[in-house]
């Protein structure tokens, strides 16, 4: 896997197995362990898709390593974390995200999360607000928001057919052409922003043993839910970043979600000409927005903006 300079791989054990995470432990970010432990924690949680992993945030989190203790896990079933041979459920991720935070953090933390994982994080924050200080979320969506049923789409139905699902994963997802095609057609607004390292990082994750279980659970819609049924219960100060050209959920969905809870969702920032993962497509812009929102979430009055 691709690990930034000055970071190393560590792990914790959750109820579903070992969860790997990446944290800064050496030069140029940290000169000693004591200095690292004295910093406030910033957690980065990746979204889901064929080959997803903590690599998704690897062009962003080093920018904060001299100021924060960085934790960037591969969620269970993805990257280098354990890949149980099971169909995954929403509860699996609500539980393991909570367990990761409880095992690695002693104080409420600032969490930055992406897409469906961001929606899961909202639900964890509703159930366990004591774990969180603030949230910065890129395109948080349950994928079945406002009554839409993703699991009834043609592709979700197709991928639900036994044997066919494995064939499609092996031939259409876990290949270099499959990864590149998905990134170009579904994830990025501009294909010319995709470079070889991104493709190879996703491919390496997609080819891990049993990687198909989490990916197929996601594509079938087993992990989808209606975030609009939960969003009003959120109390943690939150900022949302939304790519205008996201293929799965439009900014209009994001605006509707934000308007349901302006007390918690203080900022909504739409980005033109950006797709599902602004953290990979325009990492410098994403870094700038995170730097902007981190202090404002604890200091500013409520205000939904764009």
Image (cartoon, rainbow, N blue to C red):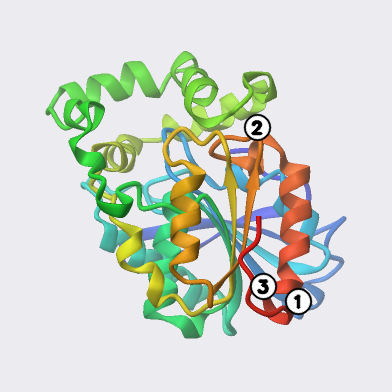
Residue 47 placement (x, y as % from top left):
48, 47
**Number of other residues with Cα within 10 Å of mark 1, as a class: few under 14, some 14 to 19, many 20 or more:** some
How many numbered callouts? 3
Front disc: 2 or 3: 2
The residue tagged 2 is: 273
**Number of other residues with Cα within 10 Å of mark 3, as a class: few under 14, some 14 to 19, many 20 or more:** many
Q: Residue extending furthest left? A: 162
What residue is shown at x 87% (from left), y 55% (from top)? 28
Q: CA distance from mark 2 to mark 3?
A: 31 Å
Q: CA distance from mark 1 to mark 3?
A: 6 Å
Residue 62 at least partly seen = no
Badge number at residue 39: 1
What residue is shown at x 34% (from left), y 38% (from top)? 215
What residue is shown at x 14% (from left), y 24% (from top)? 163
Mark earlier in primary sequence (2, 3) = 3
Q: Is residue 214 above or below residue 96?
A: above
* Contact (Cβ within 8 Å) of mark 1 with mark 3: yes
Q: Quadrant of the N terminus?
A: top right
**Number of other residues with Cα within 10 Å of mark 2, as a class: few under 14, some 14 to 19, many 20 or more:** some
The residue tagged 3 is: 41
Residue 78 placement (x, y as % from top left):
43, 45
What residue is shown at x 63% (from left), y 47% (from top)? 270
Residue 62 placement (x, y as % from top left):
76, 53
Mark earlier in primary sequence (1, 2) = 1
Instruction: Look at the numbered disc 2 and give the secondary structure of its residue.
Output: loop
In the drawing, does residue 271 fall left or right of residue 121?
Answer: right
Q: Is residue 112 above or below residue 99?
A: above
In the drawing, does residue 288 fall left or right of residue 248?
Answer: right
């Amino acid at each position: 896997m691709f690990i930034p300079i000055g970071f190393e791989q560590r792990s914790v054990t959750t109820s579903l197995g070992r969860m790997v995470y990446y944290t800064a432990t050496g030069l140029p970010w940290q000169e000693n362990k004591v200095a690292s432990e004295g910093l406030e924690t910033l957690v980065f949680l990746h979204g889901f898709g064929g080959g997803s992993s903590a690599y998704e945030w690897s062009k962003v989190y080093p920018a904060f390593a001299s100021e924060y203790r960085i934790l960037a896990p591969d969620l269970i079933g993805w990257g280098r974390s354990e890949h149980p041979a099971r169909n995954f459920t929403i509860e699996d991720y609500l539980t393991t995200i909570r367990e990761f935070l409880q095992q690695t953090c002693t104080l409420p933390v600032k969490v930055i999360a992406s897409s469906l994982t961001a929606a899961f994080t909202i639900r964890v924050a509703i159930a366990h607000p004591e774990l969180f200080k603030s949230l910065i979320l890129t395109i948080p969506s349950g994928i079945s928001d406002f009554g839409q049923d993703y699991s009834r789409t043609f592709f979700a139905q197709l991928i639900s057919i036994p044997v066919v699902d494995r064939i499609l994963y092996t031939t259409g997802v876990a290949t270099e052409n499959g990864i590149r095609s998905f990134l170009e057609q579904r994830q990025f607004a501009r294909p010319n922003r995709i470079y070889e390292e991104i493709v190879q990082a996703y491919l390496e994750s997609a080819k891990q043993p049993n990687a198909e279980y989490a990916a197929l659970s996601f594509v079938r819609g087993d992990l989808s839910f209606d975030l609009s049924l939960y969003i009003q219960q959120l109390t943690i100060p939150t900022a949302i970043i939304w790519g205008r050209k996201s293929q799965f959920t439009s900014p209009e969905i994001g605006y509707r979600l934000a308007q349901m809870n302006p007390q918690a969702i203080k900022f909504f920032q739409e980005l033109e000409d950006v797709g599902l993962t602004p953290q990979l497509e325009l990492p410098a812009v994403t870094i700038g927005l995170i730097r902007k929102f981190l202090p404002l979430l604890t200091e500013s009055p409520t205000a939904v903006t764009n």
